[in-house]
Amino acid sequence: MASAQEELEPREIAEFRAEVRAWMEANKPADPGFKLPQSFLEVESDRQFDFLRSWQRKVYEAGYLGLDWPAEYGGRGDVLKRQRVVSQELGRARAPFLVNVIGLQWAGPTILVYGTEAQKKRMLKPILSAEEIWCQGFSEPGSGSDLASAQARAEKQADGSYRVTGHKVWTTLAHKAKWMILLARTDPDAGKYDGLSFFLCPM
């Protein structure tokens, strides 16, 4: 049964919703015979991870992921903002979640806005396809969610690269990740809330 919001949707959105809903009904994975986690924080085994990674790739290859990312970076260049419809229908179908959460929700959107052209071409499509998993390097021993107290340092080298020293904790899926979004202090003399930089760090 359609909600009141859905009844007011433009025709092209309603048609797309029906298309996605039918695809989900036909392609939602069967019970794999083992427990599936409910979030990326709960992935405990290789078979869980492999299952979820394959599911994300299938959603992407069907054309239902990266809809509002530019086509030249692996997306669909959709001006109708239909990605929200896919998210809603994934939830409605109680389908498995998309495992590359840090890439899809944090790294990718940041690269789209602030990344170089080379970074966009190199990094965005593998995020969508789950070819390359991302993790998050924010929390540190003794600082937890207080990001302003981060002590990991990044020092610029003669060749323009940065050398990072320090410790990160609670880095979910780090052992599966190709890249990390990393916060490190580039100006140790700045105030607590200043001098932090955001890095795309290879694992």
Image: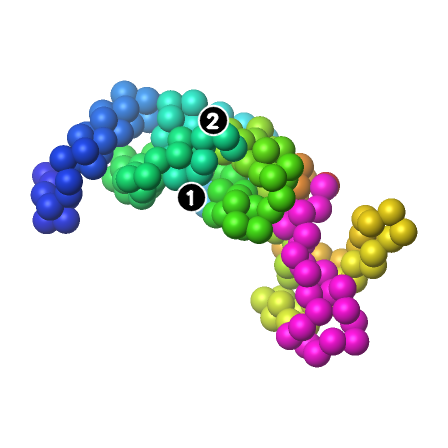
26 vs 168: above or below: above
Name the residue type under label 1: Gln
Tag 2 secondary structure: helix
Direction from residue 140 to residue 38 in the image, left or right:
left
For disc 2, the marked residue is 57
In the image, which residues are magenta?
180-202
Nearest the camera: 135 or 50?
135
User: Secondary structure beneath disc 1?
Assistant: loop
Badge 1 density bin: few <14, some 14–19, many ≥20, Cα 10 Å: few
Tell me what residue is drawn at x 45 percent, y 30 percent.
71
User: Which residue does the numbered mark 1 point to in the structure image?
Assistant: 38
Q: Nearer the viewer, residue 143 or 31?
A: 143
2 or 1: tag closer to the N-terminus: 1
View extreme (front): residue: 117
Inspect the magenta stretch and tell me whether residue 195 lies in it.
yes
Image spot of residue 199 (x, y percent): 68, 52
